[in-house]
Image: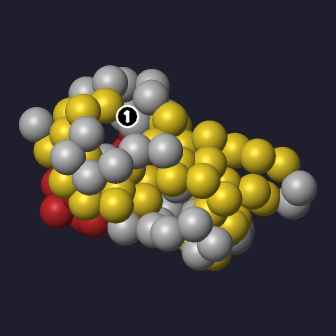
């Protein structure tokens, strides 16, 4: 049997699918999201954006506006880009203070959920 879990890490949401194995027709005890997270190595967490130096889009959509510029300083919560998804405008915010090293999208691009929008440095 499989079960989907939604894990919230700061402003990021991760959907994880966990498979339960049965033992003598009894389903094993549920695995807590904390145990699932502990099973990730630091390297895997970095690859999904937990220890990120990138600003990541939480949804799929079309980039309609890029507000930040390379070399500009942004504060936590500043709008970096605006997406349109299902006729709704969604702002992509910076998760920390820093300097925008590189903008990875252009206006008109279609990006998927989890795609990097910009690289941010100290």
* Mark 1 secondary-structure assignment: loop
Depicted 97 relative to depicted 47: above or below: above
Query: What is the x, y in percent for residue 55?
Result: 38, 50
Query: What is the x, y in percent for residue 4?
Result: 66, 58
Image quarter where the N terminus lies is bottom right
Q: Is residue 29 left or right of residue 59?
A: left
Using the image as rendered, state which of residue 72 and residue 39 is in the foreground: 72
Using the image as rendered, state which of residue 2 and residue 112 is in the foreground: 112
Using the image as rendered, state which of residue 49 and residue 26 is in the foreground: 49
Picture residue at 17% right of the left edge, 62% below the top:
43
Picture residue at 68% right of the left edge, 67% below the top:
62
Residue that mark 1 sits on: 95
Q: Quadrant of residue 40?
A: bottom left
Q: Is residue 35 left or right of residue 14?
A: left
Q: Is residue 116 left or right of residue 63?
A: left
Residue furthest right as drawn: 87
Using the image as rendered, state which of residue 18 and residue 100 is in the foreground: 100
Picture residue at 15% right of the left edge, 44% below the top:
121
Query: What is the x, y in percent for residue 122?
Result: 10, 37
Residue furthest left as drawn: 122
Q: How is the image coloured?
A: secondary structure
Query: What is the x, y in percent for residue 64?
Result: 66, 59
Depicted 17 relative to depicted 101: above or below: below
In this view of the protein, can residue 41 be seen by the observer?
no
**Circle 1 residues within 10 Å: few <14, some 14–19, many ≥20:** many
């Amino acid at each position: 049997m499989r079960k989907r879990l939604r894990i919230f890490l700061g402003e990021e949401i991760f959907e994880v699918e966990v498979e339960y194995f049965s033992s003598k027709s009894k389903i094993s005890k549920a695995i807590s999201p904390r145990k699932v997270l502990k099973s990730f190595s630091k390297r895997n967490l970095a690859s999904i954006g937990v220890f990120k130096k990138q600003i990541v889009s939480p949804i799929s959509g079309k980039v309609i506006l890029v507000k930040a510029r390379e070399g500009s300083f942004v504060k936590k919560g500043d709008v970096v880009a605006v997406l349109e998804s299902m006729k709704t405008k969604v702002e992509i915010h910076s998760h920390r203070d820093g300097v925008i090293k590189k903008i990875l999208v252009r206006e008109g691009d279609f990006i998927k959920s989890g795609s990097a929008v910009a690289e941010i440095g100290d």
